[in-house]
Amino acid sequence: MADIGRYSVKQSGNLGLGQGGFNTYTDTSLHSGNWVAFKAVHGDAVIASSTSATGDNLPASMTLSEGDVVYGDFTAVTLTSGKILAYIG
């Protein structure tokens, strides 16, 4: 559990509300960063692969239906198709 206590209660609440900002991805390139959640928007999104700082990677070719959100401590993501918001944290 890498850095599980790095955020205060208030900070973690703000991250959950997206107040850290977000990146939008629609291509199939590998993207690196520090995100706390991925949300599918404007239709379904297929996540080809992801990397988590805790080792809890998403299953390969995971489909998120429009509006679905998956939470974690993500450091990399690659899409197969669709559009996601990657919430910074």
Image (cartoon, grey):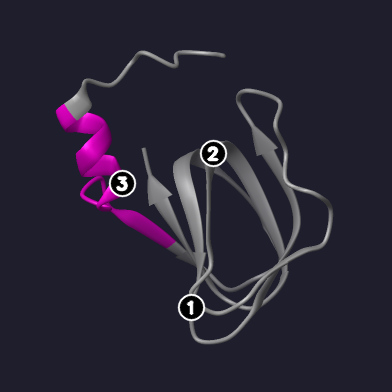
Say whether residue 37 is left or right of residue 26: left
Mark 3 → mark 1, Cα distance in angstroms: 17 Å
Residue 86 appears left or right of 8? right
In the image, 57 versus 30, the foreground residue is 57
- N-terminal of the pair, mark 3 or mark 1, is 3
At 70% across and 32% down in the image, what residue appears? 56
The disc placed on residue 16 is 3
| Residue linked to disc 2 | 72
Whether pointer 2 and pointer 1 mark residues with C-beta atoms closer than 8 Å, the reply is no
- At label 1, the amino acid type is Val
Q: Which residues are magenta?
A: 10-23
Percent x, y of residue 86:
46, 55
Q: Residues within 10 Å of mark 1 (few under 14, many from 20)?
A: some
The N terminus - image quarter: top right
Q: Residues within 10 Å of mark 2 (few under 14, many from 20)?
A: some
Circle 1: element type: loop
CA–CA distance in space, label 2 to label 1: 18 Å
Quick check: is 3 in the magenta stretch? no
Give the image location of residue 64, x and y in percent: 64, 69
Question: As shown in the figure, which amino acid type bears the numbered disc 2?
Answer: Gly
Q: Residue 53: where, in percent of width, then height?
A: 60, 25
- N-terminal of the pair, mark 2 or mark 3, is 3
The mark nearer the N terminus, 2 or 1, is 1
Toward the bottom, the furthest residue is 42
Residue, far right:
60
